[in-house]
């Protein structure tokens, strides 16, 4: 996030040490976003971070599953349904 590129070594590790190809990703949600002692990013920084994370996952051929903005229970159900459907 501070402009440092990915080294050749890290790029190689990213291509060869893959986790599960499905990745749940939760985009920033403006209506509930707030900073605190643990989350210090501004809204703009959160958007930038999300965009870079998404680009990086896609670069290494992960399949992104975007979790919808919904109630906690519906989000949990969405994730569990996706996990259970791949078994």
Image (spheres, rainbow, N blue to C red):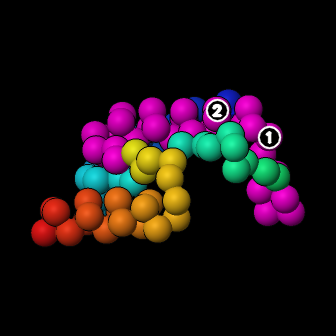
Please identify the quadrant where the C terminus is shown.
Answer: bottom left
Calculate the distance from the C-alpha at mark 1 to the C-alpha at mark 2: 10 Å
58 over 69 or under it: above or below? above
Q: Quadrant of residue 39?
A: bottom right
32 over 61 or under it: above or below? below
The one nearer the camera, 83 or 31, is 31
Q: Is residue 15 magenta?
A: no
Residue at (44% x, 60% y) in the render: 75
Residue 83 image point, x, y percent: 25, 65
Q: Which residue is mark 2?
A: 48
Residue 2 image point, x, y percent: 72, 35
Residue at (16% x, 62% y) in the render: 86
The one nearer the camera, 78 or 5, is 78
46 over 84 or under it: above or below? above
The one nearer the camera, 29 or 12, is 29
Q: Is 31 on the left or on the right of 80, as rendered?
A: right
Residue 36 can be seen, yes or no: yes
Q: Give the numbered dot on residue 59.
A: none
Q: Is residue 58 magenta?
A: yes
Residue at (70% x, 50% y) in the render: 32
Residue 4 can be seen, yes or no: no
Residue at (43% x, 61% y) in the render: 74
Q: Which residue is mark 1?
A: 42
């Amino acid at each position: 996030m501070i402009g440092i590129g990915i080294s050749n070594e890290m790029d190689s590790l990213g291509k060869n040490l893959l986790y599960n190809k499905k990745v749940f990703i939760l985009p920033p949600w403006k209506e509930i976003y707030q900073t605190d002692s643990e989350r210090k990013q501004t809204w703009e920084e959160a958007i930038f971070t999300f965009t870079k994370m998404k680009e990086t996952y896609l670069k290494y051929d992960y399949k992104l599953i975007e979790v919808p903005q919904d109630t906690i229970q519906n989000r949990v159900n969405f994730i569990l349904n996706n996990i259970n459907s791949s078994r």
